[in-house]
Amino acid sequence: MKLLTWTIFSLLIAALCACGSTASNPSPGTPNPPGNSGGLGFKTASLLPEQLKDLEQELSPLLVELIELARSLSRNTSTLTGTLTQTGNTFTYSATPTNRLRVVWSDGVFYEFVITQFQGSLSSGAQAFYKGNHLLQYTASLDPDGEMGPVNLSLRSERQGANLSVSLVGSATFEGQAHTLNLNYAQVVLSDFGPGSIDFRHQDTLQGSLSGPSLQVQVNETYDFRLVGSGSLVMQTIRTLNNTWSEGGQSFRLQNGLIKRVFRDGNPIEPDFWTASGDLLRGGVRVGGFGQQFVGNNLEQFLDTPSGRVRLGAFRF
């Protein structure tokens, strides 16, 4: 949560607006698609689904931490409502309201949660709750202090053993337009942390829809994440995209999209193992696709479209 080095506010801006690159160490001069001529659709369909998935993976553990904090401050092990108010790095608790959990951050931003299911064990802390068997269902209302319109989400997270299933439904107003989303993803943990070394791997499937006044996206993606090592850690991510969308009376499709990245101790390695491939189709005809190239010391991965280039990331080797 904000107290623990991250903020949903910045994540929502990146995810829902899809305005910024996912790049690290970006180089200047890379063209981005314009706000019209189909540019919003290209960028939304290639960047937004992954970041909405990440949103839930951040928001649900945050809520568990907030509940743990509220229970500690209220000295009531069943607390799910009330108000947490942040001042500096400390929080105070009030028992009202009695129908939701309200969080007032020190910068004036507030979140509200209505929790309808909270099943799991907090005996080993919030992180263990989310990684263990649980059923968490709630609505979240976020008002990021005027930077974007209200965000109202209904989320459900259930884990049984190695299997996690998540649904994310709701609405958000950004760029002055109301959008609705309905996403589901399933995660299977194939290997976990072991003594003396790490071999952690999970595979995810993400499906659903995102729609606005001028844009409808059907999401069909998979993810493969692996982290291995002992003294040094190597992380590999593989994302496939077969999303479709309609915009301006035209139909588009990402076909056989593949984005692969490899890092050691947080730094990009082995550029020969990196991949960005696949086609962008309009009415069944190829009009662009994924690619990558070096610009100086940066390896850029991108999606070429009729409206320009959408940069998916730039990584310094």
Image (cartoon, rainbow, N blue to C red):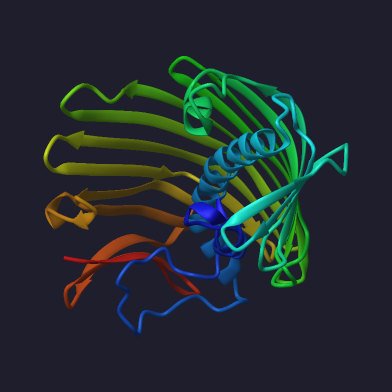
Image height of 134 relative to 254, above or below? above
* Residue at (47% x, 44% y) in the render: 242
* Residue at (70% x, 31% y) in the render: 75
Residue 190, given in percent of the width and then of the height, sits at 33, 21
**Would residue 282 be visible to someone looking at this image?**
no
Residue 132, given in percent of the width and then of the height, sits at 49, 21
* Residue at (60% x, 75% y) in the render: 37
* Residue at (58% x, 39% y) in the render: 65
Q: On the rendered structure, is 181 left or right of 178? A: left
Q: Nearer the viewer, residue 109 or 269?
A: 109
Q: Nearer the viewer, residue 78 or 52?
A: 78
Image height of 33 relative to 45, above or below? below
Q: Nearer the viewer, residue 293 or 11?
A: 11
Image height of 302 relative to 130, above or below? below
Callout count: 0
Q: On the rendered structure, is 21 left or right of 217? A: left
**Would residue 37 be visible to someone looking at this image?**
yes
Name the image quarter holding the C terminus: bottom left
